[in-house]
Amino acid sequence: MTHTPLKLHFNDVHKRFGRRPGLIGVNIQLIGGEGTVLTGPNGAGKTTLLRILAGLEKPDRGSVDMGLGATRWRRCYSDLRTSILYLHQHPYMFDGSVSSNLAYAISDKHNRCLCQQRISEALKWAGLTAIADNHAKTISGGERQRVALARAWLREPRALLLDEPTANLDPEARTRTLELLFRLKESGIALLIASHDPHHFASLADKHLQLTQGVLAEEFSETSNVTPFRRTHP
């Protein structure tokens, strides 16, 4: 899966929550093949920012440059929804098998053979072949996260926004999730990961952003004492 290089600029994004300012003049870039980790205290607006970037929540003010000059968010949110995929912290599983959950990510289901081929490829890519027929609502948290990433792989977004993708996962499940994220990044997808544990993503992150009291700033904290993720498969 290869993607055209992405370069998206979000400028002067503002969002209020009642009388309380949530996001204040946020500027952020999403660049293909780059990983960015977003941290901040609870209630800082990390999830809101991800949803705005994905075209799912309207900012009070802000513009987007998708390569043709800056335009208002409300004029390009449908393009954002096409290009950017947001994954919730707790991936939703539809009734049915793991395979049938992957089928929801395929837009063209008229060619049944091609559809089955793509599902098989996604199962293999995510290491889910052995549980393809299991009911999706009975699988573990780590397996659910891999199903969500396999659906993303099938959707082929240009950017993937993830909200705490390794929260409450055991070390083995976390490593497998990180490996899939590494592959997505290698394919040219821009990754933006909101997390309270940035050290888990040390080898994925080209940038570390901190959101505090509505203001976004780049962090340059020392992470050399953290053992980074290493791939276990080619």
Image: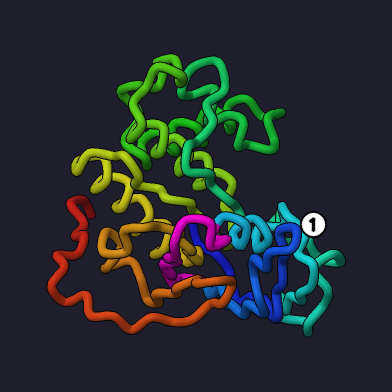
* Residue holding disc 1: 78
Asked if the magenta segment contains residue 33, the reply would be yes
Where residue 223 sits in the image (x, y, percent)? 21, 75
Quick check: is 27 in the magenta stretch?
no
- 31 or 216, which lies in front? 216
Question: Measured from the top left, where is residue 136 in percent x and y?
Answer: 45, 21
The range drawn in magenta is 32-46
Q: Quadrant of residue 206?
A: bottom left
Is 120 on the left-hand or right-hand side of 198?
Answer: right
Q: Is residue 218 above or below residue 72?
A: below
Residue 224 visible, this angle:
yes
Of residues 39 and 77, the one drawn nearer to the viewer in this rendering:
39
* Any part of residue 5 in sight: no
- Quarter residue 17 falls in: bottom right
Q: Give amino acid for label 1.
A: Ser
Q: Main secondary structure of the magenta part?
A: loop
Return the x and y of residue 208 as percentages of the image width and height: 39, 74
Tell me the SS state at disc 1.
Answer: helix
